[in-house]
Amino acid sequence: MGVLNTTPDSFSDGGSYYREGALNLGLALARAEQMVGEGAAIIDIGGESTRPGAAPVGEQEELERVVPLVEAIVAQLDVVVSVDTSTPAVITAAASAGAGMINDVRALERPGALAAAAATGLPVCLMHMQGQPQTMQRAPHYDDVVGEVRAYLQQRMQACAAAGIARQRILLDPGFGFGKTDAHNLALLRELQSLAPAGVPLLAGLSRKSMIGRLLQREVDQRLPGSLALALLAAQRGVRILRVHDVAATADVLRCLALVEG
Ligand code: 8Y7
């Protein structure tokens, strides 16, 4: 899964596709096409920055960022478009525009999101987050991070089942860096295999994250080796979809793994 950030303030590629204050569809589409050529099977589009401390975005602005780009990618490229959103109106509009998956860092907890996602019939990724993006990294605390994340994901799967979202449509994600210290992230990485019930695929986002910055003392443009190492570890521990910025490099790593494992 290649990340295509349409927000002007993303930590890694913020504003790359903006010209004179407006999202440039051609630039964003070219980047999506490049990632598909490098091996991405899914393109994840987000219109609301979820990085720590990010300002919330209005529904109309999120719709205006996301919908035209979903339409353009679906029309031009043979790839599944995932929409990173928590907003019911965006879930509905993205599905109408041809999106193939919903990626919600709030695990469909916003009022109306479960019903909106159920009505689309699309697969959904449920991610764990402690707290809210503005404050989640202030003092994350768990008694048992692995047990609590596993229980939360289980509980959200049950909420989905009650709303009519079948288990076959669900992906789970521990949410690295979302209300977690480095120790929490490392514990979750060690125990990845135990987080999802059998048959429910795991998705993980580790690419360029600040935990790599802190653990290795690397600025955001120096985090590729750390990102690749964690991608490989995650894949070996059963993660089926990796959300990454560096598609070509990650694809090489996964190809090596596949060759060794036969
Ligand atoms: C994740 C994510 C982000 C992640 C899923 C970043 C939108 C922050 N991270 N979605 N989104 N999992 N499912 O560092 O880890 O890219 S945004």
Image (cartoon, grey):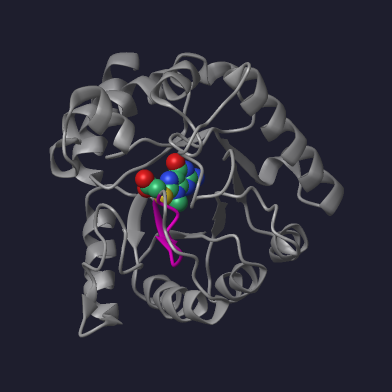
Residue shown at 49%/21% (left/top)? 188
Residue at screen point 23% across, 64% down: 31
Residue 62 seen from this side = yes
Could you say which is closer to the camera, residue 69 or residue 60?
60
Instruction: Give the left or right position of residue 122, taking residue 41 as reference.
Output: right
Residue at 29% across, 79% down: 25
Of 219 and 63, nearer the camera is 219
Q: Is residue 43 above or below residue 182?
A: below
Labels in figure, total: 0
Residue 59 left/right relative to 164 = left
Reply above or below: 184 against 72. Answer: above
Whether residue 49 is in magenta: the answer is: yes
Q: Residue at x 26, y 55 (%)?
A: 35
Q: In the image, residue 52 lies at what x, y percent?
A: 41, 48
Q: Quadrant of residue 81?
A: bottom left
The answer to which quarter of the image holds residue 256 is top left
The residue lying furthest to the right in this view is: 162
Furthest toward the front, the residue is 138
Q: Which quadrant of the rendered structure holds the C terminus? A: top left
Q: Residue furthest left?
A: 222
Q: Tell me where the magenta segment starts and ends, as one range.
A: 42-51
Can you give x and y, in whole percent of width and height, for residue 100 in the image? Answer: 54, 60
Image spot of residue 242 (x, y percent): 39, 38
Res. 255 in view:
no
| Percent of width and height locating residue 148 | 66, 24
Decide whether residue 10 is among the magenta residues: no
Q: Quadrant of residue 8?
A: bottom left
